[in-house]
Image (spheres, rainbow, N blue to C red):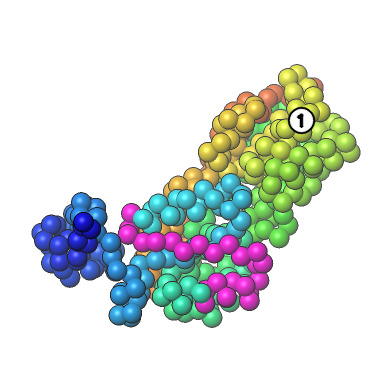
Amino acid sequence: MQRRLATLEDVAREAGVSQQTVSRVLNKPDVVSERTRDKVIRAMQALHYVPNRSAQLLAGKSASSIGLITASLTLHAPSQIAAAVKSYAGLHQMEVSIAMPAQVDYPSLQARLNEFRAQHIRGTIISLPLESSLAEQLVEENPDIACLFLDVSPETDVCCVRFDHRDGCGACVRHLWESGHREFGLLAGPESSVSARMRLSSWREALHWLGVSNAVTVFGDWSAASGWNKTFELLHQHPRISAIVVANDQMALGVLSALAQLNRTGSQAVSVTGYDDTADSFYFQPPLTTVAQDFNVLGKRAVELLIQLMATPQKKISELLPTRLIIRESTRPCKTEAGDEKTQLITQLKALVEKL
Ligand code: IPT
């Protein structure tokens, strides 16, 4: 015999609250206190309550879903961000509708927002590198959908939560310099990506400050395959490079694999740094020194801020999350230069200037 499906009334009785409160938890969870929300959610779980979405939509209520427009989920970072968004949205009883456009231009992004609108979605997270003008145009053309951006430049006039690239990039370059490295290869992300460009200019700024002007730059496409290919190119043309600064861990995986193939390991090793600290980076061979961006925190804040923005559309949100350098075995002291007296003197002088 089929079990009777629990109703809203059953949940209210089980939680000891009114039906209106249960309905608020479903439709506007942010206006209910955390304690009451937990009580209602526990009652829903105990009774295996399933909200009737079609009835809610037919009654003209907005769906308790949010949108996520993301960069390719074959990339480790965007997929970890999507996983975090999905689980924090779940805690707020919200589904996530995911769009992964192949083209990043106004018509394709507008088409995704139109699809969300048809599903009564009123808020979306955009985890995709966007130029300022495109992000601003989307906000202007879609005043009924709250948009929160994760990958735009600081000067873009839209609501965003993003990582502070400066500190991490500077710390990474200084770490290599202090380990005696003077011949750098920079493996940047694609030039079309805002964050890739910002990482590259921060590395160059830090190197310039240290007096290094001969760093060689190549561009990958964020994939391990591009990291692999570019390492051969880089070391073939510039065999003296002792450190490769890489714009993400996924490309660094390819770099480490190419270095192993070229026998540049052990005492011949080229130091490598990554960026992201994705869940697997500790298990690379050797474990990767990298700049950590906490995607779990990003997903949590993105969901919380989007809920606030949906409740108060005129709100201005711009939040910066910290990054952190994590030193592991893929970076080592550079043997050829470490003992150089002139180099040591420069390092000491720089440290002194910094203190002053
Ligand atoms: C950024 C990642 O750091 C990078 O590895 C790559 O996956 C890129 O996304 C794809 O667009 S994270 C972004 C929120 C700046």
Measured from the top left, where is residue 189 in percent x and y? 70, 51
Q: Is residue 214 magenta?
A: no
Q: Residue at x 45, y 50 (%)?
A: 84
> Residue lying furthest front in this view?
1
Q: Residues within 10 Å of mark 1 (few under 14, many from 20)?
A: many
Q: Residue at x 22, y 68 (%)?
A: 23
Residue 185 visible in this rendered orientation of the protein: no
Measured from the top left, where is residue 289 in percent x and y? 61, 33
**Is residue 270 shown above or below 24?**
above
**Quadrant where the C terminus is found in the figure:** top right
Residue 120 visible in this rendered orientation of the protein: yes
State the residue in front, 249 or 323. Answer: 249
Q: Left of 114 or right of it: where is 258? A: right
Give the magenta-colored segment's residue range.
91-114
Q: Left of 181 or right of it: where is 24? A: left
**Quadrant where the N terminus is found in the figure:** bottom left
Q: Residue at x 15, y 66 (%)?
A: 9
Dot 1: what SS?
A: helix
- The residue indicated by pointer 1 is 259
**Is residue 7 shown above or below 83?**
below
Which image quarter: residue 91?
bottom left
Measured from the top left, where is residue 140 in percent x and y? 53, 79
> Residue lying furthest right in this view?
237
**Is residue 142 shown above or below 20?**
below
Q: Residue at x 46, y 76 (%)?
A: 117
Question: Within 8 Å of ligand 1, the CB of disc 1?
Answer: no
State the residue in front, 73 or 165. Answer: 73
Measured from the top left, where is residue 49 in percent x and y? 24, 59
Q: Left of 57 or right of it: where is 15? A: left
Amino acid at dot 1: Leu
